[in-house]
Every structure is written in structure tokens, then in C-alpha cells.
Image: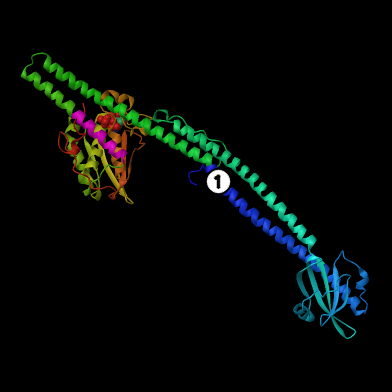
Amino acid sequence: MSRLPLRLRLTAAFGLAMAVLLTAAGFLLSDHLGTSLDRTVAQGLRARAADISALVKQADTGLQESGLRSDGFAQVLDLRGKIVDHTPGLTESLLATAQLQRAKSGPLLVQRTTLSEGTVRLLAQPVSAQDRRLVVVVGTPLESRDAALATLRTELLVGGPIGLLVASVIGYLLAAAALRPVDRMRARAAAISANRLSERLPVARSHDEVSRLGDTLNEMLTRLETAMERERSFVADASHELRTPLAHLQAEVELALETPRTRGQLETALREVGIETDRLSQLAADLLLLARSDKGKLPLRLDDVALDELLGGVAARFDRRARDDRRRFEVNVPHIHVRVDRLRLEQALGNLVENSLRHGAGTIRLSATADDGMLDLHVADDGPGFPAGFAPHAFERFSRAEQSRGEGGTGLGLAIVAAIASAHGGEADVVASARGADVRLRIPRSVSQRQAPEPPRRRQTNGDPRQLRSSPAT
Ligand SMILES: Nc1ncnc2c1ncn2[C@@H]1O[C@H](COP(=O)(O)OP(=O)(O)OP(=O)(O)O)[C@@H](O)[C@H]1O
Ligand SMILES: [Mg+2]
């Protein structure tokens, strides 16, 4: 059954239900007609019995002469069963002895088959006349009642299957019409491939379940297309970013091999090669982190961390570079303990400080506030801030404001900050402040361990992962 097309299964179920309904309706109808015909017959018999009883009381029934065969026949019996009077031709008692006994005490309705009349219905009722107790029996043939019932049953037997067939055909056509849009969607969906994700399923404007299914599937296609688009541009951007240091490496090595070089020149070339290799491994580590975060599998190693110590450590790490640029740090953090991944948070804050050093100006302010279970970490500076309209895109991968394009960054720093915030169950955003840049990391004070313990982190060229993005990028 489950292999049959849906429209056939629907039609079969519909047909079956109709068959049950029609059969039940047929039975009810014929039963109802039978009952009402019986009631009419009984009423006629009662009226005739009353008439004849009245005549019996007047001592003259005149049944012999009545000859009324059209509305039935009658007999008057005494209590021993002897016929006192009868309509013509009824010379035998209509009642058996037992029936006569029962009829003495009250009206009795019986049915029997006679040779001359076929099936008949009889009403017997006692009557007292001139000190005699008699029983009046009236009867009527059931021929016309049975004929009416038989006609109805024949009509039902012929009309029922025809009705069932018509209903099933209509059911099939309706099911086919309702499922046609589904079939069209299926055909289009089968034709949509990864390269044609911009196509959409045809959706009828009927606002029913099928059109809602189509709308939902189309929304899913839009999400898939966006994700695929993002993936493609991510891969394209990543390859582009990888190409630059690789080209530098190649040029350095070729140059070193081309001409005889002094030891000093070779050392300089090797140092350049080292810088480019660092850049490459840093880029690879960033891409790996983002790929893990995409899968929701950026593992956290949660620790009880003193917040002032954490932010103070970040400031100390960049202090030398800041002083070289004649800049300074201002750290304003309460002494509270939070449960976070220390290294990841240091990495995120390091990226923000790096940005302030590279894109901002003036004092770099690290601050933190904690309330109702949430922790706000700010890294702000007095530079030009995020260009108007760029802030909402700043956390996208490889996104850099126009004026930062020549500055050597890859545009992954803030994307990594956002990924780390999200792994902690929080978020990162740019605070719309009047002057300078202010990036906020908002995470729960006590992050719940959502992932399995992290396997040992791979060591980078310069060891500690907190150093990952702290080395000069240029
Ligand atoms: N403190 C800041 N002041 C002004 N602009 C900023 C600041 N921080 C970030 N930006 C802007 O946001 C862009 C994205 O920053 P992001 O850290 O993601 O990339 P990046 O610094 O250019 O490169 P990298 O991948 O090396 O960090 C920057 O290119 C810059 O235009
Ligand atoms: Mg950056």
C-alpha cells in the first residue's frame, strides 16, 4: 500500500470511507422506511379492528357481505377458536390456539404466512358483546410494503456503487490537483544543484499547507545560498591572503639562490622568510579557529580567572609596542573572578588591542563591568573610530574599511573576536560612541562548559597561542 502513489492511497481511503458511509446510510434508510411502513400498517389495522369491534357490540358485523378485500380481511372468533363471523373465503381460524389465548387478555400483533394472501400481518383484540367474550382479528397483506422495501433496496444497490465510483473519481481528481504543485516543486528541486542555488521552487499563491511548505523550502534555499556564497568568498579570500606571503617567500628564496650572497644578505633573506612563514602559520591558525567555530566546535578550557589580572596581562604584553608609538594603556577593571577560557579571551582582547594600535590613536583603555551575570569588556581608543556604515560589517571575515586596506591586516581579527565571544555564549559589537573606537565583548560571567574538553592545542611557531596574533603583522 505504501508503494502506491499518494493520490491513489488518498482515493482508496476516501473510497473506503464513502463505502462504509453509503452502506450505513442504506441500512438506516431501509430500516427507517420499513419501520414507518409497519407503523402505517399497524395504524390501519387498529382502525379497522376498532370499527369491527364497534359492529360486534351492535351484534351485526356484516363481514360476510362486506367483501372488502382491498384494505384487508377480518374474522370474529369466540374464545374456543370457533369462527363467529368472517370476510368471504376465510373459513379457517387466522389464529393458532396459543395466539388466541394471548389475544384474550389484550391486543396482539402477529405476522404469518397464509396460502392465499402470502405474508400477512394480523391484529387480534378482545371484545365483549352481549355477555359474550369474542376476539376480533383483522389482517392485511404485506405485499405492497415488501415491494416498496425491495424497490428501495434495489435502488440503493445500483445507485450506491455508482455514487461511490463518482465520489472516488472526484476524490482522485481533487487529490491529483492538490498534489500537482508538490510534484512541480519536486521536479524543480531535483534540478537545483549546488551551482544553481539562486533558483527557487514554484509556489502557488494559495496560502495553504503546500504553498507554506514551498515558502519554507525557498527560505531554506535562500539560507543555503547565503551560506554557500559565504563559504565561496571565504575560500576565495583565504586563498588570496595565502597567496601574498607565499609569493613573498618564493621571491625571497629565488633571490637568495640567484646570485652569490654574503652571509649577512642570506641572514636578512632568512629573516624575511621567517616573517612570512610566521604570517602563514598565523593565517592558517586563524582560518582553523574560524572553521571550528563554524561547526560550533570551538572548544573552551574554562578556568577561574581574576579579571584585573587578565586585562593587566594583556596591557603588559603590548606595553612596549604602545610606548614605541608614544601611546599608553589605561586599565580600569574591578577585582572579580570569572569563569572563562583564559587563553581564548586573551587572544580576543589581544586582537582588539592590536587593532587600537594599528587603526586607532591615543590612550588605549581596557575596562570591564559586571552585572546580573553578564560581563562587559571594552577596548577603546581615541583614534578616528570605525568609518560610518562600516561598524555592522566589521566582524565579517576579511572585511576591512577602505582606508585600512593597505595596512597589511587580513581582516580576520574581529571575526575571531566574535567567534570567541560566541563560543562563550556571548557576542561582540562596536559601541556607537562619540569619539574614537570602542569594541565591547559581552559574555556570561560564568560560562557553562558546552563542549568536550579540548585536546592539547597545537603549538605555534612562537609557542603560546596567546602570542598568535600579537606579533607585528607587517
Ligand atoms: N580601533 C579601531 N579603530 C578604527 N578602525 C578599526 C579599529 N579596529 C578595527 N577597525 C577597522 O575594522 C577592520 C577590521 O578589523 P580586523 O581586526 O578584523 O582586521 P584587520 O585589523 O584589518 O586585520 P587583522 O586580521 O590583521 O586583524 C580594520 O581593517 C579597520 O578598518
Ligand atoms: Mg585586526
Bounds of the magenta segment:
278-295
Nearest the eye: 395 or 110: 110
Q: Quadrant of the C terminus?
A: top left
Q: Is residue 153 left or right of residue 366?
A: right
Q: Is residue 73 above or below residue 157?
A: below
Q: Where is residue 215 shown, x and y percent of the image?
A: 49, 38
Badge 1 amino acid: Leu
Residue at 45% across, 33% down: 190
Q: Nearer the viewer, residue 405 or 218?
A: 218
Vertically, is 396 above or below 343? above
Residue lying furthest left in this view? Answer: 263
Give residue 445's position: percent from left, percent from top.
29, 49
* Residue 470 location, quadrant: top left
Q: Residue at x 25, y 34 (%)?
A: 286
- Res. 325 visible in picture: no
Image position of 292 with respect to 129: above or below = above
Q: Is residue 283 magenta?
A: yes
At mark 1, the secondary structure is helix
